[in-house]
């Protein structure tokens, strides 16, 4: 969790006048800048082992990168405790620091639990859309991984395959189609790039998760109406005489 201060924050260990809490995951680093902060930002990081947080991982993930206001409630208590700990914690004996670490964990858990209850007051559709955006982002970032499959996505997001398929049941495309279409779009773009002409069609396909040449060629033709080789040749063909490039 990060405690970020605005431009008027003094230097040293003095508590910031304004702060925002943000939950992040070191496995999936995310750059978050509090909306109210302009200029210099000071951050205090509280490391919480996953096993120590008594909340369901799939629920906690809904809070990742969501700024939490410290204006009231348990978030205000947690922010004030962390600011005081930063200012005076170094003067405490080791056993006292250990006890205060346990207190910080309890306060953080209470804060996150309260935020989850706030989310639960929203509609099921709102929660589904939040999770869908997270999954689409995960797919986009991992298209090059040949092991990216619906099962991998479900496991990474702590849900069953049935739940994942249910999320996509009312979407224009299934989760498998989203993966395949994303990979094909990347291949389509790279095959048209002159600076990648030295790479074979299959090398480009494998760069985006296609491990079987015939499967890739068939999927590409179904999507674009021509073969990958034909697309590359068409893209690299010179413009007709008398016609300037756009």
Image (cartoon, grey):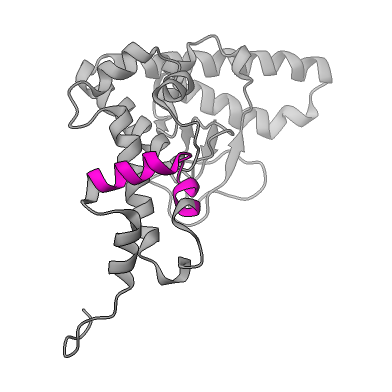
- Please say if 56 is above or below 157: above
In the displayed structure, 71 sits above or below 98; it is: below
- The residue nearer to you, when weighing 238 against 131, is 238
Figure quadrant of residue 154: top left
Residue 219 is one of the magenta-drawn residues: yes
* Residue situated furthest front in the rendering: 214
User: The magenta stretch spans which residues?
Assistant: 203-222
Looking at the figure, which quarter contains the C terminus? bottom left
Q: Nearer the viewer, residue 177 or 35?
A: 177
Residue 136 lies, in percent from the top left, at 34, 35
Residue 204 spot, x, y in % from top left: 46, 53
Whether residue 36 sits left or right of residue 28 in the image: it is left
Q: Is residue 118 visible?
A: no
Main secondary-structure element of the magenta-colored stretch? helix
Q: Residue furthest top?
A: 54
Return the residue found at the far bottom: 242
Q: Position of residue 53 (x, y in %)?
A: 57, 14
Q: Residue at x 47, y 37 (%)?
A: 19
In which quadrant of the rendered view does residue 88 lie?
A: top right
Asked whether 243 or 124 is in front, the reply is 243
The stretch drawn in magenta includes residue 108: no
The reply to whether residue 9 is in sight is: yes
Say left or right for 12 vs 125.
right
The residue shown at (54%, 39%) is 29
**Looking at the image, is 196 positioned above or below residue 112?**
below
Task: Judge whether 70 appears above or below 98 on screen.
Answer: below
Give the left or right position of residue 51, taking residue 148 as reference. Answer: right
Quarter occupied by residue 137: top left
């Amino acid at each position: 969790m990060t405690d970020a201060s605005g431009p008027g924050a003094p230097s040293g260990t003095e508590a910031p006048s304004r702060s925002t809490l943000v939950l992040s995951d070191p496995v999936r680093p995310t750059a978050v800048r509090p909306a109210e902060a302009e200029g210099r930002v000071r951050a205090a990081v509280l490391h919480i082992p996953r096993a120590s947080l008594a909340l369901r991982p799939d629920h906690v993930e809904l809070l990742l990168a969501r700024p939490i206001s410290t204006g009231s409630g348990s978030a205000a208590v947690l922010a004030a405790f962390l600011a005081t700990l930063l200012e005076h914690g170094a003067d405490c004996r080791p056993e006292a620091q250990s006890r205060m670490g346990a207190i910080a964990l309890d306060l953080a858990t209470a804060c996150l639990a309260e935020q989850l209850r706030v989310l639960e007051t929203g509609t099921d559709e709102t929660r589904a859309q939040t999770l869908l955006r997270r999954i689409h982002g995960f797919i986009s970032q991992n298209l090059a991984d040949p092991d990216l499959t619906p099962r991998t996505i479900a496991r990474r997001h702590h849900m069953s395959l049935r739940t994942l398929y249910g999320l996509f049941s009312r979407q224009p495309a299934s989760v498998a189609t989203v993966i395949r279409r994303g990979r094909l779009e990347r291949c389509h773009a790279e095959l048209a790039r002159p600076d990648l002409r030295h790479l074979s069609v299959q090398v480009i396909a494998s760069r985006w998760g296609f491990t079987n040449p015939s499967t890739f060629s068939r999927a590409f033709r179904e999507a674009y109406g021509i073969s990958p080789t034909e697309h590359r040749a068409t893209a690299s063909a010179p413009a007709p005489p008398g016609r300037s490039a756009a």
